[in-house]
Image (cartoon, grey):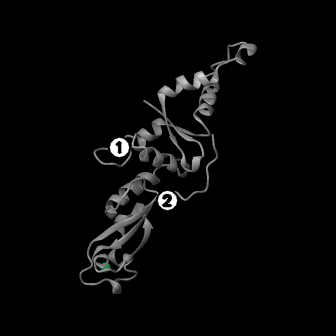
Amino acid sequence: MTTSTDIETTPSAWIGCLACYNNGRLVGAWFDAETADTVTLADVHDGANHVRRDCEEMWVLDHENIPTKGEMSPSEAAEWGRVIVSVPERDRPALCAWVASGDYIAEGAGDIPSVNDFEERYAGHWDSFRDYAVDFAEDIGLLNDAPETLATYFDWDAWARDLAMDYTTVAAGGGCGVYVFRAL
Ligand SMILES: [Zn+2]
């Protein structure tokens, strides 16, 4: 398995004031997405005395580490944030890649991924699917009973190719390996 990197995985949301935005003033800041729905107008305006009379609605105009495109409401960003941080930090890039692939299980009717399904399916971050297949073969003792002289000639490529039918893989960012998912 590949080692995890130190990339930032905290989902965050840039929450702005819509009224100010519509008046040509970009007023807002970055917040943790997880608590985006508790952010107040005073937080967004850097103090209550900067809130104007027509300031009312807040909107997420940008976000990071949330695997969906476009703007959203702070409560939607909070939903995404809570789901993503409920997964261990090292697995978050895999969760985001799973969602970004489009081939994932959503929770209910929306776009938010089902963490249970993710955890059931995710089989790790590997340099290649073949690496996973070789490790899996060891786990199940595939060649335990084969004479060593024969095992040397085992066709790993063919084995990995057939095994791949029961899995989907998603390329990891930066060209470093693949995330492997069981097709249940
Ligand atoms: Zn405002």
Element class at badge 2: loop
Q: Which one is nearer the viewer's eye here, 32 or 132?
A: 132
Which of marks 1 and 2 precedes in the sequence?
2
Q: Residue at x 62, y 19 (%)?
A: 142
Identify the residue at image location x=48%, y=26%: 165
Taking the image as shown, residue 101 lies to the left or right of residue 124, namely left
- Residue at numbered disc 1: 106
Is 8 above or below relative to 160? Answer: below
Q: Residue 10 shows which numbered tag?
A: 2
Residue at x-position 31% and y-position 71%: 58
Q: Give coordinates of residue 6: x percent, y percent.
A: 61, 56
Tell me where residue 85 appears, x and y as whole percent: 46, 54
Occupied quadrant, residue 104: top left
* Amino acid, disc 1: Ala
Residue 140 lies left or right of residue 33; in this view the side is: right
Three-letter amino acid code at disc 2? Thr
Mark 2 Cα-neighbour bin, 10 Å: few <14, some 14–19, many ≥20: some
Instruction: Say if 163 sits above or below 1 in the image.
Output: above
